[in-house]
Image: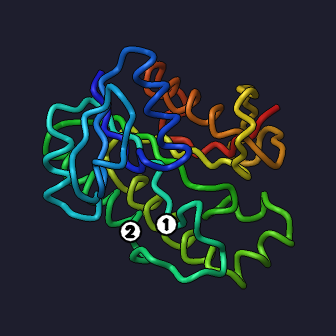
């Protein structure tokens, strides 16, 4: 299977790409500075998914799309100056939806965050307060927009809402909660998310569902 991964240079995206390649899939990524990206086995398209023509080029021949884009790079604090467009995620996912519909590609996995949209009451009050007073609110607002875009599409989508992402990559266990049913904890390893995303692609898990996820 050939998979376009949006956000391939991120800490989660790179793990998703590595797991996909390990399982024998072809991987395509869009990278602003290809010379700085060193993952072997991935096809790299120079540019940004914010640009429609770049997505059009990258998605050619693909069977599925994964988006783990974030508007906050690891070097940027929650109160720091935002360096990306506030709608970078929703514009990128909209570009993907349009191209998928044109080319007949159905499967897409989107990673947002626990606390987005109708999962707002599944996070502690302190975190909701932190979202309101920090720049996280812009990311959550854009996550909400891209979730709605997928829900209103005719694609076979899955929206994964992880809790706090960690680098405890030995823990691959997953708990999930859908529409208030189930019990999850506060955090999940990026590697567990990466494994789950590829499982969703391969096994059709959580079709048209929005599970909150954590480690067990």
Kindly check if marks 1 and 2 are in contact, taking CB atoms under 8 A apart as contact.
yes
Q: Which residue is mark 1?
A: 71
The relative height of residue 39 versus residue 153 in the rendered view (above or below) is: above
Q: Residue at x 57, y 27 (%)?
A: 195
Residue at 73% across, 52% down: 164
Instruction: Give percent across and percent down for residue 33.
Output: 30, 55
Residue 115 as seen in the image, left or right of residue 103: right
Q: Is residue 7 left or right of residue 154?
A: right
Q: In the drawing, does residue 204 fall left or right of residue 45?
A: right
Pick the quarter of the image with the N terminus: top left
Numbered mark located on residue 88 in the image: 2
Q: Name the residue rendered at 50%, 79% in the picture.
A: 82
Q: Quadrant of residue 152?
A: bottom left
Q: What's the coloring here? A: rainbow
Neighbor class of circle 2 (other Cα within 10 Å; few <14, some 14-19, many 20+) is: many
Query: SS at mark 2?
Result: helix
Q: Residue at x 72, y 36 (%)?
A: 176
Residue 81 in the image: state x and y as whole percent: 54, 83
* Badge 1 element: loop
The residue carrying pointer 1 sits among few (fewer than 14), some (14 to 19) or many (20 or more) residues within 10 Å by Cα, namely: many
Gap in angstroms between the C-alphas marked 1 and 2: 7 Å
Give the percent coordinates (x, y) of residue 106. Answer: 29, 36
Quarter holding residue 167:
top right
Would you say 122 lies left or right of 104 here? right
Q: Please state which of residues 25 and 43 is positioned toward the viewer in this rendering.
A: 43
Q: Position of residue 133 (x, y in %)?
A: 72, 85
The image quadrant that residue 173 belongs to is top right
The outermost residue toward the top is 24
Query: In front here: 83 or 139?
Result: 83
């Amino acid at each position: 299977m050939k998979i376009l991964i949006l956000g391939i240079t991120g800490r989660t995206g790179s793990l998703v790409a590595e797991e996909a390649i390990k399982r024998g899939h072809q991987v395509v990524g869009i990278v602003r500075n290809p010379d700085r990206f060193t993952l072997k086995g991935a096809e790299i398209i120079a540019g940004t998914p914010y640009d429609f023509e770049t997505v059009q080029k990258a998605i050619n021949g693909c069977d599925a799309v994964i988006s783990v884009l974030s508007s906050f790079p690891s070097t940027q604090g929650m109160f720091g100056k935002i360096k990306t467009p506030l709608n970078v995620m929703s514009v990128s996912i909209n570009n993907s939806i349009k191209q998928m519909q044109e080319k007949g590609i159905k499967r897409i996995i989107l990673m947002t965050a626990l606390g987005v949209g109708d999962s707002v009451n599944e996070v502690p009050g302190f975190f909701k307060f932190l979202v309101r007073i920090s720049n996280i609110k812009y990311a959550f607002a854009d996550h909400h927009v891209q979730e709605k875009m997928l829900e209103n599409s005719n694609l076979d989508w899955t929206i994964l809402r992880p809790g706090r992402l960690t680098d405890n990559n030995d823990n691959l266990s997953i708990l999930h909660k859908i529409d208030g049913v189930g019990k999850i904890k506060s955090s999940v390893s990026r590697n567990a998310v990466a494994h789950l995303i590829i499982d969703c692609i391969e096994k059709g898990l959580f079709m048209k569902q929005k599970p909150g996820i954590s480690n067990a």
